[in-house]
Amino acid sequence: MAINLYLADKYKKLMPATPEQRALAYQWSVWAMTEAEPPMMLVLKHRMLLPEQERDESIAKQAYESISGPLSVLESALKDKQYLGGQDFSVTDLNTCSVLGFLSFLKYDLSPYPNIGGWMQRCGTRPAAQKSAQLAQESMAAAMG
């Protein structure tokens, strides 16, 4: 998050223009790390990452259910907006959407959150996002062999 915010600010790419919009970039970046990411990481840990004998499905289930709270906040914030800052994609969306990308690993049903679903699709179909996904897949394929 800090690196993305720094680079956006330094190179004036994707950093919102006004102080109010920049405040939203910081707000949503911190929100993603403190509100959305922790329950998703608990689910991943207790369903996929920890050795099986250390996993606790009750922790995973409770964390999975708690994701709806932060998603409800984001769903409301995206009402009548293309992106978190309004009509233009910015570092606000880059940071927040990158964290919420973990929802796909969880097979989280976003159908109750149409604003989030549409926003994530808009973020993910941008040419830069497509190129980044392609590079990640290529590097994983090369690393595997």
Image: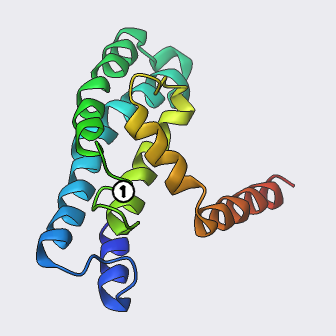
Q: Nearer the viewer, residue 6 or 92?
A: 92
Q: How is the image coloured?
A: rainbow
Q: Nearer the viewer, residue 111 or 64?
A: 111
Vertical side of 102 occupied by 32: above or below: below
Q: Which residue is mark 1?
A: 83
Q: Nearer the viewer, residue 137 or 59?
A: 137
Query: Which residue appears farthest toward the top when viewing the image?
Result: 58
Q: Quadrant of the C terminus?
A: bottom right
Quick check: 115 left or right of 33? right
Residue type indicated by callout 1: Tyr
**Dot 1 alpha-carbon crowd within 10 angstroms: few under 14, some 14 to 19, many 20 or more:** many
Residue 22 on image: x %, y %: 19, 72
Query: Which residue appears farthest toward the front when viewing the image?
Result: 80
Could you tell me which residue is drawn at 41 percent across and 66 percent down? 89
Residue 52 on image: x %, y %: 55, 18
- Total residue callouts: 1
Residue 29 on image: x %, y %: 27, 58
Could you tell me which residue is drawn at 60 percent across and 56 percent down? 125
Q: Quadrant of the N terminus?
A: bottom left
Query: Which residue appears farthest toward the right when viewing the image?
Result: 145
Residue 104 sits in which quadrant?
top right
Q: Regarding mark 1 in the picture, which secondary structure is present there?
A: loop
Could you tell me which residue is drawn at 82 percent across and 61 percent down? 142
Residue 36 sits in which quadrant?
top left
Residue 133 on image: x %, y %: 66, 58
Could you tell me which residue is drawn at 60 percent across and 69 percent down? 128
